[in-house]
Amino acid sequence: MEKLAYHCRHKMLVCLPRTLSTISKRTHKSFSAENASVNIQSPSKPCMSIPKVSRIFQPSNLREGYEGGDMTCRSQRLMLQAGLIHPSNPGCFYYLPTALRSLEKLVRIIDEEMQAIGGQKVDMPALCAAELWRRSGRWELMGKEMFRLQDRHDIEYCLGPTHEEAVTELLASQSTLSYRQLPLLLYQVTRKFRDEQKPKFGLLRGREFYMKDMYSFDISEEAAQQTYESVCHAYGRLFNRLGLRWVQVQADTGKIGGTLSHEFQLPADVGEDRLLFCNNCTFSANVETVNTEETNCPQCHTGTLNESKGIEVGHTFYLGTKYSEVFNAMFINSQNKPMVAEMGCFGLGVTRILAASVEVLSTEDAIRWPGLLAPYQVCIQPPKKGSKTHSATHLAEELAQSLGDCLPNLRGEVVLDDRTQLTIGKRLKDASRLGYPYVVVVGQKAMEEQPLFEVLCQGTGETMFLSKEALVDLLSQVETV
């Protein structure tokens, strides 16, 4: 009976967010229809101010051949040159306004996927007591990778590299937790700290970075396995939405622990992980989990293993009761008896996903974003100041404003390159390097009796001349978050 009630609740948690979203949309449509004929006078919303390139805080390194030290990979070089990030201490970076827009979009997508499977967002302290880590046995295990410090009372702490101890202690403090409240999935998106010996590759391997870490609590091993699969499927949906080629491979549990682990990898030559794939079946694994002396597949025993490299962007673990037993994280079952909760933990390297996307999608001299993560979707290019078509500048400004006003999906997504002292060629080169998905040039054809705008689609390399109506129709299809 307990398991039946649990499974019903588990199913409801997965379906409920989508059901509520559907009901909300229907209710909104019904309300709109009922009130369509009612003349309600409300204050008009002010037009949004269109961002201008000259006003965006972004170091102008694009045309200066900026190198900025040891460039070890494409994403690091492109992001530094474009003024998306700026180095601080080794392995630490400033995230500048343009990069932060992309990062916030990624977090919104992560929130959607985690909450769709019942995840609840929390925020845990970065400063973690050493006492918790000693109880789990990881204070010594983590070694020099952990940033450690003492307060004025000589009490030891660390800057959290991960939060298994903290979240389990939080749950253990809830003495009346019922099986009806499980599965419980708590997650956060926070800065993490790891004292990498040799930080490199920009945001791909740093000392301070953003991570999404989720922790699950279940009534049984079977239920925990279901939660594990649910989160893995959510990760797959996330990477599919970003248009990234990804693989899920068996992995070592490492210092996190547990009995089951998978990595989510983006295949890339710059990747530090070595991956093995069978040419005969679905087997795939990190080389750390396989006896490298064997060349045959351990699953089908007939196929051979081929090796490639990848960038790890996600990691999942089934923990069992490794932490819940230590911290006495219990729930009350249907027989009113206390039981130890089964746990899982699930990580996504948020800033790593951002950089890895740039790494695998971009060319050597131009950033190409996943469509949903582009800082701005549209860049409007007015004519050069003093040129024969300079009088069309006002058309560019009007177009930028009207696109943001008439297309809800483009609110805040249109930027005007007002650096008209530069040639259109130089500005187009900058736009290509920054990776705006759509660049609209307002030139001679925009001044004709039937105005046409030159539209460059960065993803496909296609150039089109469109009327304003056709342009609006094209851009109305752009998906944003």
Image: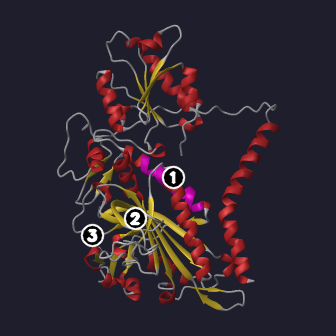
The residue pinned by badge 2 equals: 277
Above/below status of 418 relative to 433: above
Taking the spot 43% from the left edge, 51% from the top edge, the residue there is: 103
Does 360 appear in magenta? no
Give how far across and how far down residue 384 sits, in percent: 33, 18
Please give the range of residues in magenta.
102-115
Q: Amino acid at mark 3?
A: Asp
The residue pinned by badge 3 equals: 195
Q: Point out the residue furthest to the front here.
A: 302
Separation of residues labelled 2 and 1 (CA atoms):
20 Å
Say which element carries label 3.
Answer: loop
Question: In the rendering, which numbered label is found on residue 240?
Answer: 1
Give how far across and how far down residue 40 sits, in percent: 76, 33
Give how far across and how far down residue 143 sits, in percent: 27, 80
Taking the spot 80% from the left edge, 37% from the top edge, the residue there is: 33
Residue 10 is left or right of residue 348, and the answer is: right
